[in-house]
Image: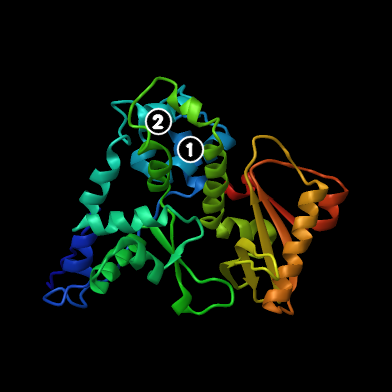
Amino acid sequence: KESHFILVICGSATSWISKKIINDTGGLHNRITEILHLHPFTLAETRLFFESKNLKYSLQDSARLYMSLGGIPFYLESLRKGESFAVAIERICFSPTGILRNEYNNLYQALFNHSDIHQSIVEVLTQRQSGMSRKEILAKTNINSSGSFNRAISELIISDFVTEYIPFGKRRRNTLYKLTDEYSIFYHRFIKSNKKYTPGIWQQLATSQTYKIWTGYAFESLCQKHIKEIKQALGISAVYTEISSLNIQGDKKKAGFQIDLLIDRKDNCINLCEMKFHNVPFKIDKTYYEQLIQKREAFIKHTKTPKQVFITLISNQTIIENDYSKEIIDAVVHLADIASN
């Protein structure tokens, strides 16, 4: 009888697997049958994981945990029954025995060879939420070798730390690189500068303006990772779409504007998405209403798009309906839609 052997290789040593297996030029060259990329959990999968562990987190706290730790099972395994979001984050990330207090350096050293290059790129990317070009990253990190940069950025992308984005209307040479690993962002924003532990430190940090700003950015990242669920909520799952963003700098003649999520649809429509994270139901007032009108008009004028532009509001809270919301908002996506299976 003919014998068949199957070799399964798995692990988190991205550099070694990429170099020695996937891109091997020796005996394993072109011999790989299947590559299974295990992505982090989605928010819905995270909720199912909590349910399997009998962890009774609300939808809002599930989102906050996801925004802090990401959908990494190893991190989520550390959560305990009966802990609130605040208590869990303080214990895991800030207490002297917290597994994520000193995980950052160990994480990158375990995953990548010459991890100092990867960490330099990541640290630079924390400085700008909207992402940076290759040229900007090289200038800020002082990485001299393009080969070293190419290897490091490729490994960061493969490992779901960094995501590539092409701005609306641009070509691939205009690619931006954005840090999308939740723990890395959370570490640089809060843990790194608060290594001296004081009981209650997270409750204090969570009332700061820095935290409020972070929740906005973190929720945007959560939404960008759940495009499939957002499209389903909008009823356009079967429509071909291209996802992008747009950041136009202002000058003396005209004001700039930024759109963090654009869903460019093949059915001749574009969803201009506004993502809002709040602690209470969200109400559109006159000022925000006028801002949305100006943003839509600026986008149409700048891009000269002939497509119909829908303003879509994505929020973790319910929207208080009033005359402004009825007039300006074409569709609303709630957190429950994003967390649906």
| Residue 255 x, y percent position in the rendering | 69, 65
| Residue 314 x, y percent position in the rendering | 66, 51
- Give left or right: position of 68 versus 274: left
Q: How is the image coloured?
A: rainbow
Task: Describe the element under mark 1 as helix, strand or loop.
Answer: helix
Whether the residues at callouts 2 and 1 have beta carbons within 8 Å, the answer is yes
Question: Which of the two discs, 2 and 1, sits closer to the camera?
Answer: 1
Can you say which quadrant of the picture contains the N terminus? bottom left
Give the residue furthest to the right.
Answer: 323
Measure how far apart labels 2 and 1 are at the Cα level: 10 Å
Q: Residue at x 55, y 42 (%)?
A: 215
Residue 65, numbered label = 1
| Residue 289 x, y percent position in the rendering | 79, 53
The residue that disc 2 covers is 79
Q: Residue at x 33, y 59 (%)?
A: 121
**Given the image, on which type of amino acid does mark 1 rest?**
Leu
| Residue 171 x, y percent position in the rendering | 50, 80
